[in-house]
Image: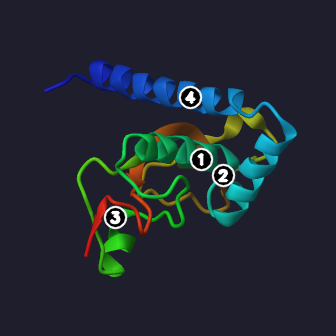
Amino acid sequence: MATDEEARAARDARLQQLHERLTAAVDQLVSGEDWKRALEFAARFRAKSFNNTLLIWAQHLDLYEAGRTSAPEPTFVAGYKQWKALGRSPLAGGSMQIFAPLMARFASSTPQNPGSWRRLDRYEKPKPGETVRSKMVRAIVSGHEKLPIGGQGMTR
């Protein structure tokens, strides 16, 4: 069993690897036409951030080049439970990684004082009169996106 420090180092390494993949995807957008295609692709997946759509695009292209999917661009991206609800079964190894925000709740009785905010535990309720705000505390790597419909990585 890994220690907390080893687990944190592994998470940080996955985050760094995903960031490098994103940077490489952006570096490949050299012409105006490349950027136009990337923006048109991102517009089809409005629920995802632009960074995450670039990651999906790059990872799907890798799968296409390896012969694991039949289309060069994904047509639909969903999590495992969504695929199951559609009657589809993603095959092992079809997962794509994206950035996911890790949110936390903070409370303060004097919100105008930046040093007065305290992080609330998972089920902790604020004290009477406290203001509560959610804030992203860090990004994590999420690997729950599966291969697109029509790709070779699906079974019915």
Determine whether 87 is above or below 58 in the image.
below
Q: Is residue 84 left or right of residue 111?
A: left
How packed mark 1 is, by other alpha carbons closer than 10 Å (few <14, some 14-19, many 20 or more), is: some
Q: Disc number at residue 49?
A: 2
Tag 3 secondary structure: helix
Q: N-terminal of the two: label 2 or label 4?
A: 4
Q: Quadrant of residue 114?
A: top right
Mark toward the start of the polypeptide (2 vs 3): 2
State the separation of the CA atoms marked 4 and 3: 23 Å
Which residue is more in the foreground, 12 or 132?
12
Q: Which residue is mark 1?
A: 52
Q: Amino acid at mark 2?
A: Ser
Disc with the residue nearer the chain's start (4 vs 1): 4
Label 4 crowd (10 A; few <14 / some 14-19 / many >=20): some
- Measure how far apart labels 4 and 1 are at the Cα level: 10 Å
What crowding class fits label 3: few (fewer than 14 Cα within 10 Å), some (14-19), or many (20 or more)? some
Residue contact between numbered discs 2 and 3, judged by CB atoms under 8 Å: no
Which structural element holds mark 4? helix
The x, y position of residue 5, in whole percent, is 31, 19
**Residue type at numbered disc 4:** His
Residue at 51% across / 44% down in the picture? 61
State the mark number for residue 19: 4
Query: From what the image shows, is residue 17 above or below residue 129?
Result: above
Structural distance between the alpha carbons of marks 1 and 2: 5 Å
Give the quadrant of the N terminus: top left
